[in-house]
Image (cartoon, helix red, strand yellow):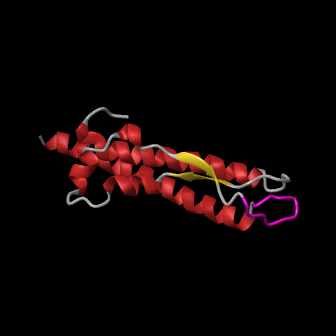
Amino acid sequence: MILSNAYNYVNVLGKAADASWTRNDILANNIANADTPGYKRKDVQFETYLANLVAGTDSLDETVSNIDLNELNCTTYIDQANLSYRYDGNNVDMNTESVELAKNQLKYYTLMNSMSQEFSRLKMAMRTS
């Protein structure tokens, strides 16, 4: 984490990338436990937290520069704990997990690309100064 308001956008992207990385681990764990009796699917909550922090503001730039990064963390939760697809109590659907994993990987690579572009813009701005 870069400790400057000038880099808060990059810091928020970094937090989002960390959450996406955590989600990737959770999804891989769900797939690994698809045949474990009684296993319940897990997921990560992050996007809602971020949306709540930036909701209802006039200036996204100002809001991002004022975000307390210590408040912006992901949490892991058990998804639909009462739902079961099988008689053994497991609620992991391999098709859903595979789609979520692919979607999450795209999100992660997009976040990393956005961070790279931000650093490229900062580098270019420093060259022209």
Residue placed most toward the observer, 80 or 93: 80
Residue placed most toward the observer, 12 or 105: 12
Residue placed most toward the observer, 2 or 126: 2
**Do we see residue 67 in this rendering?**
yes
The image quadrant of residue 66 is: top left
Quadrant in the picture for the N terminus: top left
Q: Which residue lies furthest to the front in this view?
A: 82
Residue 99 in percent (x, y) is at: 64, 65
Is 95 displayed left or right of 103 in the figure?
A: right
Name the residue: 78% across, 64% down: 84
Name the residue: 24% across, 44% down: 122
* 25, above or below 4, in the image: below
Residue 19 in percent (x, y) is at: 51, 47
Residue 102 in percent (x, y) is at: 60, 61
Name the residue: 84% across, 65% down: 86
**Do we see residue 119 in this rendering?**
no
Magenta span dominant secondary structure: loop
Residue 18 in percent (x, y) is at: 49, 44
Quadrant in the picture for the C terminus: top left
Q: Provide the residue span drawn in magenta.
A: 82-91
Whether 32 is among the magenta residues is no
Q: Residue furthest top?
A: 3
Q: Which residue lies furthest to the right in this view?
A: 87
Is 99 displayed left or right of 50 in the figure?
A: right
Whether 89 is among the magenta residues is yes
Is 8 displayed left or right of 127 in the figure?
A: right
Is 39 displayed left or right of 17 in the figure?
A: right
The image quadrant of residue 123 is: top left
